[in-house]
Amino acid sequence: MFGTSYGAPELTLITAVFLLAGAVKGVVGLGLPTVAIGLLTALIGLSEGMVLMIVPALVTNIWQALAGGALITIVRRVWGLLLTIFIGAWLGVNLFGRSDASLLTALLGGLLVAYALFGLTSPKLPAPGRHEGWLTPVLGVINGTLTGLTGTFFMPGIPYFQTLGFTRDAMVQAMGVLFLTSTTALAVALAGHGRMNFDIGAVSALATLPALVGMALGARLRQQLSEQRFQQALFISLLLLGFYIAVRALAL
């Protein structure tokens, strides 16, 4: 329903979603796009949620991608994945317009469940070794396609990055690079397929303010909360939200 004018109730809801999503990112350093797309899909639908998320996700991930001294190392290691994300996102958005909306929403729910389970169990995955050369661009296409279909950025990119032996600080920066690249690729694909317009783009831009306020509040809360316990609560919440989205989509 692109081009729909938002009234006060819808704008209040969108503001609350990005305030919460920003607070999550402020506390644990990640989760804004994930929380935002999950809640927006549950509340107003996947197609609009994907577009609304673009500007806040872009702005809030620029700093994370550029902060730190590992940017060149990260890009040299995963440049094939970063480039092919653009190909995958274009394909994903193209498929989005031809696919059943309920199935795509269920796919989003499934990805949220998978990401939550990965976060809760922290499985030890093997390093790619001699397969890294071909595996990196292939996973980029998959990651980008899932981004174009569901607006999510994290699978299989984050699990794969964890097999590459980055230090903790470099891993945080690598996630920022992944999210920033995926957001840009999604924005280009949505615009190229005519799935963005001025009205919803303006609302997305305005949603950046509560996201930044939420991040500032979350950064202050970080001093008073156990980051590990908060992450566990976040993943459990994403697990339940993913189940709810998938079951509701398949039941309709």
Image (cartoon, grey):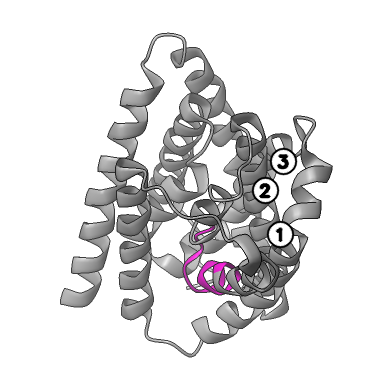
Q: Nearer the viewer, mark 3 or mark 2?
A: 3
Would you say 212 lies left or right of 252 here? right
Quadrant of residue 184 in the image? bottom right
Tell me which label, 1 or 2, sits earlier in the chain: 2
Mark 1–mark 3 distance (CA, rounded to whole Å): 13 Å
Mark 1–mark 2 distance (CA, rounded to whole Å): 7 Å
The residues colored magenta run 143-153
Magenta span dominant secondary structure:
helix
Tell me which label, 3 or 2, sits earlier in the chain: 2
Q: What residue is shown with label 1?
A: 184
Q: Where is residue 117 in the image (x, y as percent from the top left)?
A: 30, 50
- Along the line of sight, the residue nearer the viewer: 13 or 113: 113
Q: How crowded is mark 3: few (under 14 residues within 10 Å), some or many (20 or more)?
A: many
Would you say 65 lies left or right of 116 here? right
Mark 3–mark 2 distance (CA, rounded to whole Å): 10 Å
Amino acid type shown at disc 2: Leu
- Along the line of sight, the residue nearer the viewer: 99 or 31: 31
Q: Nearer the viewer, mark 1 or mark 3?
A: 3
Q: Residue furthest front?
A: 130
Q: Do the residues labelled 1 and 2 touch (CB within 8 Å)?
A: yes
Q: In this view, does 4 lie above or below 171?
A: below
Amino acid type shown at disc 3: Ala
Would you say 52 lies left or right of 242 here? right
Quadrant of residue 250 in the image? bottom left
Q: What residue is shown with label 3?
A: 65
> Element at badge 2?
helix
**Quarter of the rendering occupied by the C terminus:** bottom left
Say which mark, if any, is on residue 58: 2
Which residue: 59% across, 60% down?
200
Q: Is residue 123 above or below residue 168?
A: below
